[in-house]
Amino acid sequence: MTSTTTLHSSAGPAPALAGNDAGASAGFALGLPPRRALLPRPAWAALFALVLAIGIGVPFASLVLPASSPFHLSAYVLTLGGKFMCYAIAALALDLVWGYCGILSLGHGLFFALGGYGIGMYLMRSIGHDGVYGSDLPDFMVFLNWHALPWYWHGTQHLAYALALVVVVPALLAWTFGFFAFRSRVQGVYLSIITQALTYAAMLLFYRNETGFGGNNGFTDFKRIAGFSITHPGTRTVLFLLTFATLVLAFIAARAIVLSKLGRVVTAMRDSETRLMFLGYSPLAYKLFIWTLSAVLCAIAGALYVPQVGIVNPSEMSPANSIEMAIWVAVGGRGTLLGPIAGAVAVNGAKSLFTAYFAEYWLFFLGALFVIVPLVMPRGLAGLVETLLARVQGARAGARASTLIEGRSKS
Amino acid sequence: MIARLRYCLCAAPLLFALVVSAAHALTPAELAPLAGDDFEEKSAAIDKLVAMHDPASLAVLNALADNRALAGTSAQVLIQDSDDADHARDAITGKTVAIGDAQPITLNNLLRSKVSGALAGLRLASPDPQARRAAIEALLANADPSMKPLIDSARAKETDPALKRRLDTLWAMTALSDRDAAKRLEAATLVAARRDPDTYLLLRPLVAKQADGSFAEPDARVREAAQKGIDALDSMARESRIAGTIFAGISLGSVLLLAALGLAITYGVIGVINMAHGEFLMIGAYATYLVQNLFQRYAPGAFDWYPLVAVPAAFLAAAAVGIVIERLVIRHLYGRPLETLLTTFGVSLVLMQATRSIFGAQNVQVANPHWMTGGVALFPDLILPYNRLTILAFSLAVIAIAWAVLTRTRLGLFVRAVTQNRNMAACVGIKTALIDSYAFAFGAGIAGLGGCALSQIGNVGPDLGQSYIVDSFMAVVLGGVGQLAGTVLGSFGLGLLAKAIEPFSGPVLAKIAVLVLIVLFIQKRPQGLFALKGRSA
């Protein structure tokens, strides 16, 4: 273990592994690099301040301030912010597998949607008799002339059970798929295409009425969550804060994983899987762990997303949606943790702007992003910031910045 | 006398008594209901006309069939014989009268088929064999039991053996409910021998049980004959279904092949999954659309031959776009396959949106040339459309050309060399960058040909490529990369598999099952059916 981790330092001159006083240069050095703090002290302070500001500011602005105040957060803004944060969590999840493990998944939309459907089942059940037909069953089942709930709907009236489903179902699916795919060492473009086929197949399945998830229309028309009206500003604020908390926790967890020994093995696997295998590691378990974790994180993002936007349907599983997630990560800068969060917010912000003002150019813009980002700024926004910082602060400070933003991949 | 009797028999049995006494000249009272509004009365009046069978009533029936009969103001029936729009002939007196306010006599569908059936029945006795043949065919298509007496007598008199056989069948169809069991047996045997799915409905009641458990048909021999006929029909339907499935599978496979072939070439050479490949299909289809429009406007006479121009146009258009994309984008991303994947996806978004801006989001119409419409009937209920057959032949031709280019030309040699080992190829002096461009353009051009073919069987719209792209990826993955034989086998295998599963599970589940099978298949053979041999693989 000791020797394997240091061997890495010969891989390239760019990211020095140890902190500010990176001792290991291009040479060969034995011994573990010093353990790095989860976050530098100023970053902790900034994070704490942000949590405080959001935790107090948002409820105040949305609930206490009157609607006439210019600082009042309307339901629209609150939902938009919540949506963006859900996307950010999903981007973070995708970055874990793509940026750090080298697996470009074009199927993360599936896990996102599965999480959404999991919580959606609970939300449909909690409509109760307030639906159009006033029946025990969700409206779409009445419409299909069904008389009983399918077996997989049992228990979904309990929020805790639905939350368990949100985690367990995508985890099982991801684990099973990953086990078969990674065991036979399907890699690179092949793997991407197969993940895309997976989400495509799932989309077709969910479009069918017989599957029992509302077909084309999916789930919508939710009334309440955990007993609270879903449209009430208070509920919206709580959901927003929950999403924010999840994002912060996910970021810290991802940071911890990336910095851990496990994270280092995973990064090594990205850079040269064969070399790692020669050193005696079996990549399967590492890959499976990261892959499944990423899927679950993405599902949680989906589960937070659906109550806020109030609808989930199979179009969430369309291959195009999943590829769009990849562009969030690419724009932000993969192989960094803040990058994908920024990328998700930036791309979706642009999307909101475009669809509001010049809708027909949005796809041109998105297409151009896909083309230009890999060509011109392969390291994304994070890389851009890094370069700028380096320019401003000179070479020495630049080295520090590059360590802040964890190991970038080459492919 | 005999002739008179025969004509009398043509009436429906209920009218028999009336018919015998009614052998007299046409009276205005008999025609009056035709000019009225009541369809029941019109029907009865037509029956009477049929029963009379004299030249005057025949003329009225013919006029009714051709929409030349008019109802005069005083309930008389007028017949328009000439193009003269102002005058017509009175059906009874034969005098020419002014049409004035006379209105055409309207018939509903039931009466229309009654009139045409009756005319056909009457023509059965025509001395002209051609007329008899036409009458028999008309009655076969729409056999009316009330025609039985006419058919009986015609059958007894018919001398032409071919016509006699047709007449036998016709007779059998009306004789299935005869009181004589021997006749029913003969009829059932004859009907069963027709092997026409339309006769299923005639045979079915013969073997059906009534509510009390007894057979509706008392004679066991008749039932047996009918059952034999049903079994034969069933087995024919089964064969037809199997043949239909195979044809649908091969047809889908040929379409997939056209889509996947170019993909396999570009992936093989450049190692790049081109997500914009579907859009090259679309470009080919729109090029076909443009060529079609040009022909429609400037050379409508040669419209049937527009594919001759459309095929090269589709190839060149897609290849040109392909070469531009390769030069501008893909070239700069060599060695970064995952990013190329994303980039080409972006290209596909831009191409689709550009198409929407230029041609609109709606599908455009591409018409088949005349010789591609219609089809050959393999079974009565299985028609192989000419356009699908053409595409099958076309895809085989394209694969032959691709094979020839890759194995028989210098360019093909270079392409294969780069596919096998890029560095080594560069070492021996091949300009690999140039080969990349050519190979990409070639692959794109083949996709353009695929688009040209697709425009003949499906909708042409901005989303055209999207519907085929996942399947063609699967065909490439299944077949193995850079292998023509693998792609051919992968495409046809996928097409047949999908169509074979479809009847049991519906199209959506079939698609899912195929995807799952492919994922499982890759477990066993990650390199596809055909792996490249050599160190580089």
Image (tube, coloured by chain):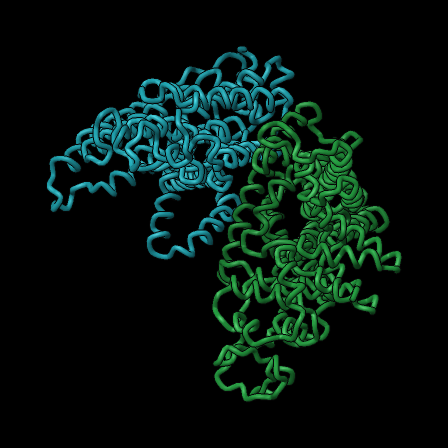
Q: Which quadrant would residue B475 be assigned to in this image?
A: top right
Closest to the observer, A165 or B31:
B31
Q: Determine the residue positioned at 75% across, 66% down.
A: B4
Closest to the observer, A254 or B360:
B360
Q: Determine the residue positioned at 48% across, 31% down.
A: A211
Q: Determine the residue positioned at 76% across, 36% down.
A: B222
Total number of numbered labels?
0
Question: Residue B422, percent across and down?
Answer: 74, 40
Residue B527 in sight:
yes
Q: Look at chain A in the picture and name its colour.
A: cyan
Question: Residue B417, percent across and down?
Answer: 79, 42
Q: Which chain is green?
A: B
Q: Determine the residue positioned at 86% across, 57% down.
A: B162
User: Which quarter of the rendering shows the N terminus of chain A?
Assistant: top right
User: Looking at the image, is A155 positioned above or below residue B291?
Assistant: above
Question: Residue B193, percent across and down?
Answer: 80, 44
Q: Which quadrant would residue B229 be assigned to in this image?
A: top right
User: Looking at the image, is B374 positioned above or below residue B477?
Assistant: below
Question: Residue B34, percent across and down?
Answer: 54, 71
Q: Is residue B239 left or right of residue A69?
A: right
Closest to the observer, B384 or A32:
B384
Q: In this view, does A28 lie to the left or right of A147?
A: right
User: Which quarter of the rendering shows the C terminus of chain A?
Assistant: top right
Q: Is residue B316 left or right of residue A257?
A: right
User: Looking at the image, is A10 positioned above or below residue B237?
Assistant: above
Q: In this view, does B237 lie to the left or right of A351?
A: right
Residue lying furthest front? B21
Residue B489 in sight:
no
